[in-house]
Amino acid sequence: MVDGAQAANKGSVGSRLMLFIKKYWVAAIVFLAFSVLNVIGLFRYHWLFGGQDLQFHLQRIDEMYQNLINGSLNPYLATFDLNQLGSAVMSLYPKLPLYLFAGIRLLVGNPITSFYLGIILTTFLGLWISYAAYHSVRKDDSVGAYVFAIAYALSGLNVTYNFLMVDIGISFTIMILPLVFAGYYHWVTAGKYRMLAASMTVVCLSHVLNILIALMALVIFLLIDIRKINRQKWLNLGKAIGIAVLLSSSFWLPALHFGTSVEMTKPYTFPLNGISLWKYTTAALSNNIAYGFTMIALLGFGLAIIRYRHLTHFSKAIFWVGLGFVILSSNLFPWRLFQNTPIVLLQFPWRFLILPQLGFTYLFSVIGSDLLRRVPQRTYRLGILGILTLVVLGLCLNSQAGRVNFEMKSPEIKADLYPNSNQIPFVQGIVWYRVTNLQQYRHLMTYIDTADYLPKMTDDTFHTLSMQRAIQDNNPAVNIPVDEKSQPAGKTMTVDIGAPLKELALPFVIYDHHYTVKVDGKQVPLASNSSHILTVTNLTTGKHTIQVSYHNGLLTALILILTLGGLVAIAWPKQMAF
């Protein structure tokens, strides 16, 4: 998979980055303006428009924000949000993107404003990363780098993941994928491994399924290039893998620990159905993008067919791998055969389309740049480039307008949420609601109807606990209210007992033995029922205060040691290579 010029060998990563900034600061300003345009269609209302996972990720962001302001930098449990049950969602779902959004909120305060600013910054980083990744592979093709950056980072598919699906983990991996494959290129051509290690670390810390999708693509490219790999490159690949494992330990270590501690509630499964190629192609042509490839990517595919004989080995590999993933995503693949296998956790085969979107946009940029060089007049070239920029921005704004038009008449969240209330409706299978002020945002931060990452329990038990009610005698129908105050990795609960109780199940789940429980200031043995719900026994009549906190010093120490080891390894001078 060899293509373009070799990356520069001289200078450290830091010096090359500074040189890049000094040389391309004008481009950075332009990219910042484009990043604002990428959200302006929705941001101008200062509302939150309902998205499939908007509530879930906003609560994760709020959980991280609450932990940061209380001095907790790496929370394992969700105690402020997600029904305040002590869910291990903060350990079982990668949380790197949360730091960006929560960090911005620390600066600006307003959670609605900070959400949009987070997407602006993500887009800006995506533009810059796309430009730099392309330029590192094709050093003399600044035009192609610019085209690739705007066509990829401002695509309708990104608008979909930002504002329809609202999955910030996927958005982060889309942002970094160009660097992943540029890192692979530099490894396969020159044995360099740090870019690959760093970019795959970001993927690992952002989204679980995209880790597997990226690895799948990298393995396919590796098989294509297997004859080009010598002993030193294999060693360097081992270093890249080792560094990525070390640097991502803050995710996989807690995920492994909590994921194997108890039997979890299984995520909701959907029928595995491939996409209709005709439907997704016509959607791309009309810019009616859902989760498919875009018009620019489709043009890149068409140009690659027309110019196939002139493509390099690298570009041909991208073409065929991209086409393979399109077919894999489609109903041409017998997905129904895998419905009762672990593959069902993929949920939607269209998840693979982020790879063809990347590859075909790259081909559009490479071929388009080569064709543009044939235009004799510089003025004409600039004019064509200007028209293309306007087209890309127009398609981006049009995609945003589609989201606004769909949600504009949706109901507002005007009260706290509660189980089985149907307060968040669906239209055409899409979540349909608006949040127009901070009070409505606070309503959205109340009950959330997802039991993922919790120990397995009945729906009645989940609903009762989620409303901050304690269960008597293992019967959810018999319960009492709980006054609660959350803190990082713990919770203080007060109950008023009308008659002596032998056992009371409180709204907090237990995963392992690393919890400390106090009743009325006195430490008591940790106890939980068959559903792994915290229980206390022999309560007398009157008010009682129960405090629960989680401390796992060994897990924290292991993460710190492994992460520091990864940082040392990736920063180790080349002259002292290990």
Image (spheres, rainbow, N blue to C red):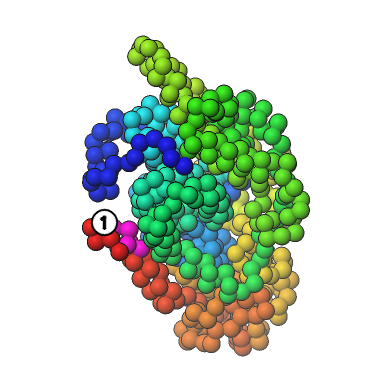
Residue at 42% over, 44% down: 185
Question: Nearest the camera: 110 or 231?
Answer: 231
Q: How many marks?
A: 1
Question: Nearest the camera: 242 or 536?
Answer: 242
| Magenta span | 566-572
Among the 4 quarters of the image, the one containing residue 28: top left
> Can see residue 54?
yes
Question: Nearest the camera: 415 or 56?
Answer: 56
Residue at 60% over, 45% down: 352
Q: Is residue 417 magenta?
A: no
Residue at 61% over, 57% down: 447
Residue at 29% over, 33% down: 24
**Type of amino acid at the residue the image marks with label 1:** Lys
| Image coords of residue 261 (percent x, y) | 58, 75
The answer to whether 147 is drawn above or below residue 331 in the figure is above
**Left or right: 408 with respect to 44?**
right
**Left or right: 402 with respect to 178?**
right
In which quadrant will I find the C terminus?
bottom left
Query: Can you identify the residue that label 1 sits on?
Result: 574
The answer to whether 478 is drawn above or below residue 143 in the figure is below
Q: Is residue 569 magenta?
A: yes
Label 1: element kind? helix
| Image coords of residue 63 (percent x, y) | 48, 59
Graded by Cα atoms within 10 Å as few (under 14), some (14 to 19) or many (20 or more), the crowding at tag 1 reads: few
| Image coords of residue 30 (percent x, y) | 35, 29
| Image coords of residue 489 (percent x, y) | 46, 70
What main secondary structure does the magenta stretch of the protein show?
helix
The answer to whether 118 is drawn above or below residue 371 in the figure is below
Among the 4 quarters of the image, the one containing residue 295: top right
